[in-house]
Image: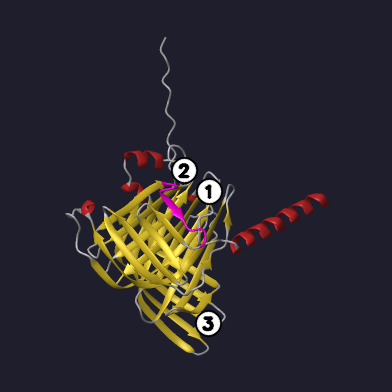
Amino acid sequence: MRLNLFLVSFLAAFWFTVSSTFAQDFDHRKPMMLEDKNYTEYWEQFFYLDDGSLVTSQFLVANFPWPVGKEHGIMLGTLVTPEGELHVIKNGRDLGKWGYNENALDLFIHTHRLKASKDDYSVHLENTMGIVDLQLTSNQPAVDHKTFSSDDGFIETSFYAPSLTGSGNWQLGPEAGFDPSGPVHNADYATGFGVHVVMTDKVDQLIKYWSRIVGVGNEGVKPFLSSITRPNSEEDIILKLFDGGEELDGFTDVDIIYDNITDEKDASYPKTINISATSDKGTLQGSFKYTKKLAHFNLTEHLNFFEKSFAKSNPSVTNFRYLVDYNLVYKTAEGEKTLTGMALSEYTDIMPAKKTPAKKRRRNRR
């Protein structure tokens, strides 16, 4: 009995040590290139531009089944125009036609590139659908969620740039209906974030839903929220206040209530998020209310016939992207302050893959 207890204690301590070491060694510069069959790693960026457009980009490396194969790189980007038109910019390539720098965050996949130099970042997306160029800055240190393990793998999540600001431009191309290209749209101000994720199991075994909110605009105190609900209903919440490029406060005791739940097809999302939180400095209470739809995005709807047949065995991931109005009351020993403004929100609902009913075998008549 003592031997069994010793082994359990030893394995628990060993796993804690390995997990802690892994979290500390999470390298944002280059992909880990793991051998796990469900290995997926990506750098994802979200930006709201002051012309009313939304830009997202995901530089992804993954091991796919045949015929795609291991070490495949994909860039999946979206551009939502101020008029609400959604354009998908995506390309996939085998290693050699995608690559990375060993010593710096510098990823390219086909003609798309994510590059960093100290606190400066650049995002370049380009194919026949359109071109996006953004130049950004973040002086915030990375903010990490806790490592979470399933029966068959783990997930590590880190906002390598929790508060990105900058400027840029975008232009639609012939695939969007222009001959040869549309006008260049300039944005004097862009607000967003960058997040790095690595996982070795299917996403529905690691995340149930994920809410992310970042305040937009170039003035005032802004909220940053990332709330992940795991399949076992545990919550992992990061809530901070940023004042310009500096962190004003971080909250360790956070309660979230999702309200006004709206159903859409096989997914759902809230239209109100109420929060109550405390920190060493004070308390924060209030709500985020969804006001303007930017896009409801499910990648499956944008795949070709071959890609859809390949995706049938994968979980369904639906992203609800909105602008939200926030009204928060921040109380400290120095007094009370009401924080109001607009924020960019994405709520991701993840559903397991639908099981295909077994075909009934017809009996041969004799």
Q: Is residue 271 visible?
A: no
Which residue reaches farthest right? Answer: 2
Q: x, y percentage for residue 316?
A: 41, 48
Main SS class of the magenta portion in the image = loop
Q: x, y percentage for residue 305?
A: 32, 39
Tag 2, which secondary structure?
loop
State how far apart marks 3 and 1 are (Cα). Answer: 38 Å
Which residue reaches farthest bottom? Answer: 334
Q: Vertical placement of 270 versus 302: above or below?
A: below
Q: Earlier in the sequence, mark 3 or mark 1?
A: 1
Q: x, y percentage for residue 48?
A: 33, 68
The kind of residue on which mark 1 rests is Asp
Q: Does the residue at mark 3 contact the one at mark 2 (Cβ under 8 Å)?
A: no
- Residue situated in front as seen by the camera: 70 or 234: 70
Q: Does the residue at mark 1 contact the one at mark 2 (Cβ under 8 Å)?
A: no
First to last magenta residue range: 94-103
Per the rendering, the mark at residue 282 is: 3
Q: Which residue is mark 1?
A: 201
Q: How is the image coloured?
A: secondary structure
